[in-house]
Amino acid sequence: MNVLLRRSLAAWVLWAGVSHGLHAQELEPGAYSPAPVGMNILVLADTFSTGDLNFDPSGPIDEASADINNTIAGYVRTFGFAGRAASLGVALPYVRGDLEGLVSGEPQSAHRSGWGDPRVRLAVNLHGVPALAPKEFAAHQHPWTLGASLTLGLPLGQYHPDKLVNIGANRWAAKPELGVTRTVGRWTVEAAAGAWLFTDNTDYYIGRTREQDPIGSLQVHVIHTFRPRLWIAVDANFYNGGRTTIDGVRSDDLQSNSRIGCTFSLPLDRQHSLKFAYSRGAITRIGADFDSIGVSYQYVWGSAR
Protein backbone atom coordinates (compact mmCIF):
# COMPACT_ATOMS: atom_id res chain seq x y z
CA MET A 1 0.00 0.00 0.00
CA ASN A 2 1.37 3.42 -0.99
CA VAL A 3 2.71 5.50 1.94
CA LEU A 4 0.60 8.52 0.95
CA LEU A 5 -2.48 6.32 1.05
CA ARG A 6 -1.58 5.07 4.51
CA ARG A 7 -1.12 8.64 5.77
CA SER A 8 -4.43 9.79 4.32
CA LEU A 9 -6.27 6.85 5.88
CA ALA A 10 -4.60 7.34 9.25
CA ALA A 11 -5.90 10.90 9.43
CA TRP A 12 -9.43 9.65 10.06
CA VAL A 13 -8.64 8.22 13.46
CA LEU A 14 -8.99 11.26 15.72
CA TRP A 15 -11.24 13.70 13.88
CA ALA A 16 -14.33 12.58 15.77
CA GLY A 17 -13.45 14.73 18.82
CA VAL A 18 -14.77 14.35 22.35
CA SER A 19 -17.27 17.21 22.52
CA HIS A 20 -17.88 20.77 21.37
CA GLY A 21 -15.03 21.95 23.61
CA LEU A 22 -12.46 19.92 21.65
CA HIS A 23 -13.54 20.68 18.08
CA ALA A 24 -10.51 22.75 17.16
CA GLN A 25 -7.84 20.58 18.74
CA GLU A 26 -7.32 18.04 15.96
CA LEU A 27 -3.79 17.15 14.89
CA GLU A 28 -4.31 15.06 11.74
CA PRO A 29 -1.27 14.31 9.58
CA GLY A 30 -2.26 12.96 6.18
CA ALA A 31 -5.72 14.53 6.04
CA TYR A 32 -5.04 15.84 2.51
CA SER A 33 -2.67 13.21 1.21
CA PRO A 34 -4.19 11.70 -1.96
CA ALA A 35 -5.46 8.14 -2.24
CA PRO A 36 -6.67 5.87 -5.06
CA VAL A 37 -10.38 5.37 -5.64
CA GLY A 38 -12.30 2.23 -4.71
CA MET A 39 -10.70 1.78 -1.28
CA ASN A 40 -12.50 1.03 2.01
CA ILE A 41 -10.99 1.82 5.40
CA LEU A 42 -12.19 0.59 8.78
CA VAL A 43 -10.75 2.41 11.79
CA LEU A 44 -10.89 1.54 15.50
CA ALA A 45 -9.18 4.01 17.80
CA ASP A 46 -8.82 4.78 21.47
CA THR A 47 -7.48 8.03 22.94
CA PHE A 48 -6.91 8.92 26.59
CA SER A 49 -6.66 12.58 27.57
CA THR A 50 -5.90 14.06 30.98
CA GLY A 51 -5.34 17.60 32.17
CA ASP A 52 -6.89 20.89 33.19
CA LEU A 53 -10.01 22.66 31.96
CA ASN A 54 -9.79 26.44 31.83
CA PHE A 55 -13.19 28.16 31.92
CA ASP A 56 -14.35 31.76 31.79
CA PRO A 57 -12.49 33.35 34.74
CA SER A 58 -15.64 35.32 35.69
CA GLY A 59 -17.69 32.11 35.88
CA PRO A 60 -18.40 29.79 38.84
CA ILE A 61 -16.06 26.92 37.83
CA ASP A 62 -12.41 26.90 38.98
CA GLU A 63 -9.53 24.42 39.38
CA ALA A 64 -11.23 21.97 37.01
CA SER A 65 -9.57 18.87 35.57
CA ALA A 66 -10.68 15.84 33.59
CA ASP A 67 -9.71 12.33 32.52
CA ILE A 68 -11.42 11.44 29.23
CA ASN A 69 -11.33 8.24 27.20
CA ASN A 70 -12.59 8.49 23.61
CA THR A 71 -13.19 5.31 21.61
CA ILE A 72 -13.98 5.75 17.93
CA ALA A 73 -15.29 3.48 15.19
CA GLY A 74 -14.94 4.93 11.71
CA TYR A 75 -15.37 4.04 8.04
CA VAL A 76 -14.02 5.80 4.93
CA ARG A 77 -14.69 5.17 1.23
CA THR A 78 -12.58 6.72 -1.54
CA PHE A 79 -14.14 7.47 -4.93
CA GLY A 80 -13.98 9.74 -7.95
CA PHE A 81 -15.85 13.06 -7.98
CA ALA A 82 -15.90 15.15 -11.17
CA GLY A 83 -12.70 13.40 -12.20
CA ARG A 84 -10.92 14.15 -8.92
CA ALA A 85 -9.96 11.88 -6.01
CA ALA A 86 -12.41 12.18 -3.13
CA SER A 87 -13.40 10.45 0.09
CA LEU A 88 -16.40 10.25 2.40
CA GLY A 89 -16.08 9.12 5.99
CA VAL A 90 -18.13 8.77 9.14
CA ALA A 91 -16.90 8.46 12.73
CA LEU A 92 -18.87 7.51 15.83
CA PRO A 93 -17.28 8.21 19.25
CA TYR A 94 -18.07 6.66 22.61
CA VAL A 95 -16.83 8.81 25.48
CA ARG A 96 -16.13 8.08 29.14
CA GLY A 97 -14.97 10.89 31.38
CA ASP A 98 -14.41 11.92 34.99
CA LEU A 99 -14.33 15.62 35.85
CA GLU A 100 -13.72 17.47 39.09
CA GLY A 101 -13.33 21.05 40.22
CA LEU A 102 -14.69 23.86 42.36
CA VAL A 103 -18.16 25.22 41.57
CA SER A 104 -18.76 28.48 43.45
CA GLY A 105 -15.99 27.38 45.83
CA GLU A 106 -17.48 23.95 46.56
CA PRO A 107 -15.76 20.71 45.39
CA GLN A 108 -17.79 18.92 42.74
CA SER A 109 -17.23 15.89 40.52
CA ALA A 110 -19.03 14.30 37.60
CA HIS A 111 -18.84 11.11 35.57
CA ARG A 112 -20.16 10.90 32.03
CA SER A 113 -20.37 7.91 29.72
CA GLY A 114 -22.17 7.68 26.39
CA TRP A 115 -22.20 8.23 22.65
CA GLY A 116 -20.72 11.46 21.35
CA ASP A 117 -21.80 13.49 18.33
CA PRO A 118 -21.05 11.60 15.09
CA ARG A 119 -19.04 13.32 12.37
CA VAL A 120 -19.21 13.07 8.60
CA ARG A 121 -16.37 14.34 6.39
CA LEU A 122 -16.28 14.86 2.62
CA ALA A 123 -12.86 15.65 1.09
CA VAL A 124 -11.97 16.38 -2.54
CA ASN A 125 -8.55 16.78 -4.15
CA LEU A 126 -8.65 20.00 -6.18
CA HIS A 127 -5.15 19.88 -7.68
CA GLY A 128 -2.44 17.26 -7.98
CA VAL A 129 -4.17 13.91 -8.32
CA PRO A 130 -7.10 12.89 -10.53
CA ALA A 131 -9.35 9.95 -9.71
CA LEU A 132 -7.09 6.91 -10.23
CA ALA A 133 -7.30 3.20 -9.51
CA PRO A 134 -4.58 1.81 -7.22
CA LYS A 135 -2.20 0.65 -10.01
CA GLU A 136 -2.36 3.98 -11.87
CA PHE A 137 -2.14 5.89 -8.59
CA ALA A 138 1.10 4.13 -7.62
CA ALA A 139 2.75 5.30 -10.86
CA HIS A 140 1.46 8.88 -10.63
CA GLN A 141 3.78 11.65 -9.40
CA HIS A 142 2.13 14.22 -7.12
CA PRO A 143 4.65 16.47 -5.31
CA TRP A 144 2.01 19.21 -4.83
CA THR A 145 -1.62 18.66 -3.82
CA LEU A 146 -4.43 21.01 -2.87
CA GLY A 147 -7.60 19.72 -1.28
CA ALA A 148 -10.82 20.91 0.35
CA SER A 149 -13.04 19.28 2.93
CA LEU A 150 -16.26 19.80 4.82
CA THR A 151 -16.79 18.14 8.20
CA LEU A 152 -20.20 18.07 9.87
CA GLY A 153 -20.85 17.43 13.56
CA LEU A 154 -24.33 15.94 14.03
CA PRO A 155 -26.25 16.71 17.27
CA LEU A 156 -27.02 13.07 18.04
CA GLY A 157 -24.77 12.46 21.05
CA GLN A 158 -25.89 12.00 24.65
CA TYR A 159 -27.23 15.28 26.00
CA HIS A 160 -29.12 16.25 29.16
CA PRO A 161 -30.31 19.88 29.32
CA ASP A 162 -30.42 19.77 33.12
CA LYS A 163 -26.66 19.06 33.31
CA LEU A 164 -23.88 21.62 32.82
CA VAL A 165 -21.38 19.02 31.53
CA ASN A 166 -22.43 16.92 28.55
CA ILE A 167 -20.90 14.60 25.97
CA GLY A 168 -23.06 15.82 23.08
CA ALA A 169 -23.28 19.48 22.08
CA ASN A 170 -26.99 19.63 21.10
CA ARG A 171 -26.22 21.73 18.01
CA TRP A 172 -24.91 21.40 14.49
CA ALA A 173 -21.27 22.14 13.68
CA ALA A 174 -19.55 22.52 10.30
CA LYS A 175 -15.90 22.94 9.39
CA PRO A 176 -14.90 23.96 5.84
CA GLU A 177 -11.14 23.62 5.32
CA LEU A 178 -8.41 23.86 2.70
CA GLY A 179 -5.23 21.78 2.84
CA VAL A 180 -1.98 21.68 0.87
CA THR A 181 0.86 19.13 0.81
CA ARG A 182 4.37 19.34 -0.62
CA THR A 183 6.60 16.26 -0.92
CA VAL A 184 10.36 16.35 -1.54
CA GLY A 185 12.11 13.00 -1.33
CA ARG A 186 11.24 11.37 1.98
CA TRP A 187 9.88 14.60 3.47
CA THR A 188 6.33 15.93 3.28
CA VAL A 189 5.04 19.22 4.65
CA GLU A 190 1.29 19.63 5.14
CA ALA A 191 -0.75 22.66 6.16
CA ALA A 192 -4.49 23.10 6.58
CA ALA A 193 -6.62 26.11 7.50
CA GLY A 194 -10.32 26.10 8.32
CA ALA A 195 -12.97 27.26 10.75
CA TRP A 196 -15.61 25.59 12.91
CA LEU A 197 -19.06 27.18 12.58
CA PHE A 198 -21.85 26.44 15.07
CA THR A 199 -25.60 26.74 15.30
CA ASP A 200 -27.12 27.81 18.63
CA ASN A 201 -27.89 25.41 21.44
CA THR A 202 -31.40 26.58 22.36
CA ASP A 203 -31.75 24.11 25.26
CA TYR A 204 -28.55 24.81 27.18
CA TYR A 205 -28.68 24.11 30.92
CA ILE A 206 -32.22 24.63 32.12
CA GLY A 207 -33.66 26.21 28.98
CA ARG A 208 -31.09 28.88 28.17
CA THR A 209 -29.63 29.66 24.72
CA ARG A 210 -25.89 29.28 24.12
CA GLU A 211 -24.28 30.86 21.07
CA GLN A 212 -20.65 30.45 20.03
CA ASP A 213 -18.48 32.42 17.62
CA PRO A 214 -16.54 30.55 14.89
CA ILE A 215 -13.20 28.97 15.81
CA GLY A 216 -10.47 29.40 13.20
CA SER A 217 -7.78 26.73 13.07
CA LEU A 218 -4.40 26.19 11.43
CA GLN A 219 -2.39 22.96 11.59
CA VAL A 220 1.04 22.08 10.20
CA HIS A 221 2.76 18.70 9.93
CA VAL A 222 6.27 17.68 8.92
CA ILE A 223 6.44 14.00 7.95
CA HIS A 224 9.46 11.80 7.36
CA THR A 225 9.02 8.46 5.56
CA PHE A 226 11.56 5.81 6.54
CA ARG A 227 10.26 3.28 4.04
CA PRO A 228 6.91 2.66 2.40
CA ARG A 229 4.12 2.76 5.01
CA LEU A 230 6.49 3.51 7.90
CA TRP A 231 6.58 7.19 8.86
CA ILE A 232 6.72 9.68 11.73
CA ALA A 233 5.24 13.17 11.89
CA VAL A 234 5.75 16.24 14.06
CA ASP A 235 2.46 18.10 14.48
CA ALA A 236 1.40 21.58 15.61
CA ASN A 237 -1.76 23.64 15.49
CA PHE A 238 -3.23 26.97 16.54
CA TYR A 239 -6.87 27.88 16.98
CA ASN A 240 -8.57 31.14 17.90
CA GLY A 241 -12.16 32.26 18.56
CA GLY A 242 -15.14 30.46 20.05
CA ARG A 243 -16.30 33.14 22.47
CA THR A 244 -19.75 32.25 23.83
CA THR A 245 -22.92 34.18 24.65
CA ILE A 246 -25.55 32.77 27.02
CA ASP A 247 -28.99 34.41 26.95
CA GLY A 248 -27.42 37.57 25.52
CA VAL A 249 -24.63 37.78 28.12
CA ARG A 250 -21.15 37.69 26.58
CA SER A 251 -18.60 35.39 28.28
CA ASP A 252 -14.88 36.06 28.68
CA ASP A 253 -13.90 32.73 27.14
CA LEU A 254 -12.09 33.55 23.90
CA GLN A 255 -9.92 30.58 22.92
CA SER A 256 -6.41 31.35 21.68
CA ASN A 257 -4.57 28.08 22.07
CA SER A 258 -2.08 25.74 20.41
CA ARG A 259 -1.01 22.11 20.64
CA ILE A 260 2.07 20.15 19.63
CA GLY A 261 2.52 16.42 19.15
CA CYS A 262 3.90 13.53 17.15
CA THR A 263 2.41 10.62 15.21
CA PHE A 264 3.97 7.28 14.27
CA SER A 265 2.55 4.88 11.68
CA LEU A 266 3.54 1.21 11.74
CA PRO A 267 2.35 -1.16 8.97
CA LEU A 268 1.66 -4.75 9.95
CA ASP A 269 1.06 -6.04 6.42
CA ARG A 270 -0.58 -4.80 3.22
CA GLN A 271 -4.01 -4.40 4.82
CA HIS A 272 -3.41 -3.87 8.53
CA SER A 273 -1.60 -1.08 10.36
CA LEU A 274 -1.27 0.63 13.73
CA LYS A 275 -0.87 4.31 14.50
CA PHE A 276 0.35 5.89 17.73
CA ALA A 277 -0.14 9.55 18.58
CA TYR A 278 0.80 11.89 21.43
CA SER A 279 -0.01 15.57 21.88
CA ARG A 280 -0.04 18.18 24.59
CA GLY A 281 -1.15 21.75 25.08
CA ALA A 282 1.55 24.27 24.21
CA ILE A 283 -0.45 27.42 24.95
CA THR A 284 -3.91 27.33 26.54
CA ARG A 285 -5.91 30.42 27.49
CA ILE A 286 -9.41 28.94 27.68
CA GLY A 287 -10.31 25.33 27.00
CA ALA A 288 -8.76 21.90 27.54
CA ASP A 289 -5.05 21.82 28.43
CA PHE A 290 -4.70 18.08 27.91
CA ASP A 291 -1.96 15.54 27.44
CA SER A 292 -3.36 12.95 25.01
CA ILE A 293 -2.11 9.56 23.93
CA GLY A 294 -3.85 7.39 21.36
CA VAL A 295 -3.55 4.17 19.42
CA SER A 296 -5.56 3.11 16.38
CA TYR A 297 -5.97 0.04 14.21
CA GLN A 298 -6.81 0.25 10.51
CA TYR A 299 -7.97 -2.35 8.05
CA VAL A 300 -7.94 -1.47 4.33
CA TRP A 301 -9.56 -3.35 1.45
CA GLY A 302 -10.75 -2.54 -2.02
CA SER A 303 -10.20 -2.82 -5.74
CA ALA A 304 -6.77 -3.99 -6.93
CA ARG A 305 -7.38 -2.94 -10.55
Image (spheres, rainbow, N blue to C red):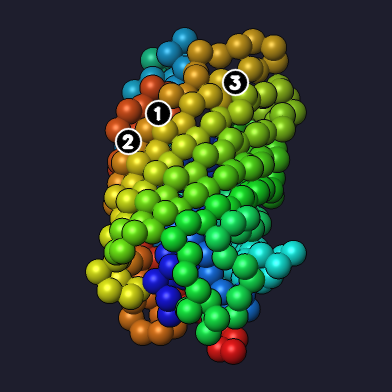
Q: Is residue 49 visible?
A: no
Give the label, 2 or 3, closer to the camera.
2
On the image, numbered disc 3 is attached to which residue? 244
- The circle on residue 257 is 1
Residue 297 position, x and y percent, is 41, 71
Query: How far is disc 1 from disc 3 in space, using C-alphas?
Result: 16 Å
CB contact under 8 Å: marks 2 and 3: no
Residue 260 position, x and y percent, is 31, 41
Q: Nearer the viewer, residue 66 or 92?
A: 92
Name the amino acid type tagged 1: Asn
Image quarter of residue 133: bottom right
Between disc 2 and disc 3, whose residue precedes? 3
On the image, numbered disc 2 is attached to which residue? 281
Q: Nearer the viewer, residue 86 or 105?
A: 86
Quadrant where the C terminus lies? bottom right
Q: Secondary structure at mark 1?
A: strand
Give the label, 1 or 3, closer to the camera.
1
Name the amino acid type tagged 2: Gly
Q: Is residue 144 left or right of residue 248?
A: left
Between disc 2 and disc 1, whose residue precedes? 1
Query: How far is disc 2 from disc 3 in space, using C-alphas?
Result: 21 Å
Residue 160 position, x and y percent, is 65, 39
- The circle on residue 159 is none
Q: Residue at x 49, y 44 (%)?
A: 192
Looking at the image, residue 153 lies above or below residue 2: above
How many numbered marks have been drawn onto this rendered protein structure? 3
Q: Residue at x 69, y 45 (%)?
A: 155
Image quarter of residue 291: top left
